[in-house]
Image: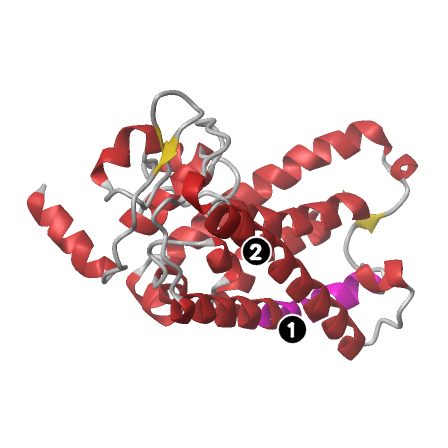
Amino acid sequence: MLIKLLGIEDAPLAIFLVLSISGLLAYFIASGLSYLLFFVLGRKRFHPDYVADPQENRKARFWGALSVAGNALFMVPFHWLLSHGYGHLYWDVSDYGWGWLVASFFLYLAVTETMIYWTHRALHSDFLYNWLHKRHHQFRVTTSWVSTAFHPIDSFAQALPHHLCAFLFPVHAVLYLVMVSFVTVWSVVIHDRVSLVRWKFINYTGHHTLHHWYYQYNLGQFTTVWDRLAGTYKDPELCYEDIPEGVVVRWQDGPGTLVGPRAPRPTDLREDMVALEAAE
């Protein structure tokens, strides 16, 4: 896809280089700007007592970059097939009409929401969690750098539904590229611990902050639909008091005041879950 737009030969190595370089640029620019805005320049407003941990941030960037590069490698066969006419991507809206373009967006969203929810839920099974997903949850208190800090296989497993859509039904190429790109931005947004938009239907930042804290809740991608249907929904408006100060941004005295003292050091999530269940 990007190969066609850039006019580069669609050889596997070229595809990998384009995907990895563009992915790394997107990661470091989006995460870097978010970190600069919320954790450096806007720290006093958004995370007042946040103290940067250089080692933790380096670890997050290492896994983030490794995830992007690994994901690019796994995506090569899919993009090679798409560039050679396999799959159902199209460029001309008139091929299927505007009605289908709108309908395909909602179908795309429904398919990816369903597949990613159940993939993410499977990644929280004991075996897959310890083998793959634990790398992401080692960052219990997140920053923008954690957005793509996954094991590469974990990252690709959660991205795979987006690529499969291009082989399951007709998808406009621009819609496909926009959705795949938006995932990177969305991942940054839900890890910065600042909930600027708080709509219960949307799996906004507060939901994902609870996910990192409680482990088995709020597993959805963009929405909370499957979490509500499958019993894994936890409302951030009702559960903030259960989390130590500083992990979330708390709104007090109206939307103009943000407070949130220093977050505690991350601890072992499994041990905390056992303790929490015992207390209940």
Q: Is residue 258 visible?
A: yes
Q: Position of residue 102 (x, y in %)?
A: 74, 30
Was residue 74 drawn as part of the magenta stretch in this picture? yes
User: Between residues 134 and 35, which one lies in front from this camera angle?
Assistant: 35
Q: Say which residue appears at 44% left-offset and 46% top-offset.
A: 43
Up-down relation of residue 12 to residue 96 (above or below): below
Say left or right for 146 vs 85: left
User: For the residue carrying disc 1, how many other residues have a C-alpha within 10 Å: few (<14), some (14-19), or many (20+)?
Assistant: some
The residue carrying mark 2 is: 31
Q: Position of residue 123 (x, y in %)?
A: 39, 59
Return the mark for residue 73: 1
Of mark 2 and mark 1, the one earlier in the sequence is 2
**Magenta region, mostly helix, strand or loop?**
helix
Was residue 65 drawn as part of the magenta stretch in this picture? no
Q: Say which residue appears at 26% left-offset and 59% top-offset.
A: 265
Q: At numbered mark 1, what does the secondary structure look like: helix, strand or loop? A: helix
Q: Say which residue appears at 58% left-offset and 42% top-offset.
A: 111
Residue range highlighted in magenta: 70-83
The residue type indicated by label 2 comes to Ser
**Residue most extreme to the bottom:** 13
Q: At numbered mark 2, what does the secondary structure look like: helix, strand or loop? A: helix
- Distance between the alpha carbons at the discs numbered 2 and 1: 21 Å
